[in-house]
Amino acid sequence: MEDRRLNRLKNYDYSRNGLYFITICTKDRIRYLSDIRDVGNAALGVPIIKLTEYGEIVDNNIKKINDIYRYVAVTKYVIMPDHIHMILFISDYEDKSVNCGTPWAAFPTKNVSQIINGLKSISTKQIGFSIWQKSFHDHIIRNEREFLEICNYIDNNPINWVNDIYNQNFWR
């Protein structure tokens, strides 16, 4: 059995209020989610992200997070061809219940992992098979400078796609 490195900080309470930078990758970095268009003209503006059918499903589910989890807000996100970046804000709100009139009610969440696992599970069910890599990457945003840098990173991710080592078109 292979050893997997833990992606989370040991002894950190991921249900604490705060900002979390999340990256979720597709299995084998397959481009299930979107296509980046007009990268050649990126200097003139932001490239166009064209979501695939699967990307639309994931996008709709990301947008529902704010409604489903009363104490969570997705403050910024981008859906790239083979990964998603998002910033989750978890508030101090005491009622950590889930809107029970939704399929998400099966995921009564208390922490970041449960929110992301809920997103992945609901999307998998709607797509019909799992497109996701195991686990996800997170970074606890500790101050305003980090928040602004990460927002800038998310905003520029489509522009930088041409330099991404996983962008196979770059090597053709």
Image (spheres, helix red, strand yellow):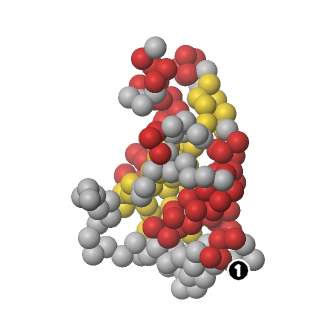
Front residue (pair 147, 128): 128
Q: Amino acid at mark 1?
A: Cys
Q: Position of residue 127 (x, y in %)?
A: 67, 51
Residue furthest to the bottom in view is 94
User: Which residue is rendered at x = 45% and y = 50% of the image?
Assistant: 133
Quadrant of the snapshot with the N terminus: bottom left
Callout 1 environment at 10 Å: few (<14), some (14 to 19), or many (20+)? few
* Residue identified by numbered label 1: 100
Whole-percent x, y for residue 121 in the image: 58, 62
Vertical placement of 111 versus 76: above or below? below
Point 50% across, 70% down: residue: 114
Q: Where does residue 115 sit, x and y in percent of width and height?
A: 53, 67
Residue extending farthest top: 172
Q: Secondary structure at mark 1?
A: loop
**Residue projecting furthest to the front:** 1
Residue ID at (53%, 33%): 158
Work out whether residue 110 or residue 172 is closer to the camera in this orientation and state it. Answer: 172
One can see residue 48 in this view: yes
Residue 132 image point, x, y percent: 51, 51
Horizontal arrangement in the rendering, residue 45 relative to residue 90 (left or right): right
Extreme residue toward the right, this view: 101
Number of marks drawn: 1
The answer to whether residue 123 of the structure is visible from this angle is no
Q: Nearer the viewer, residue 134 or 80?
A: 134
Q: Quadrant of residue 64?
A: bottom right
- On screen, residue 66 above or below 127: below
46 vs 149, left or right, is right
Q: Is residue 36 left or right of residue 29?
A: right
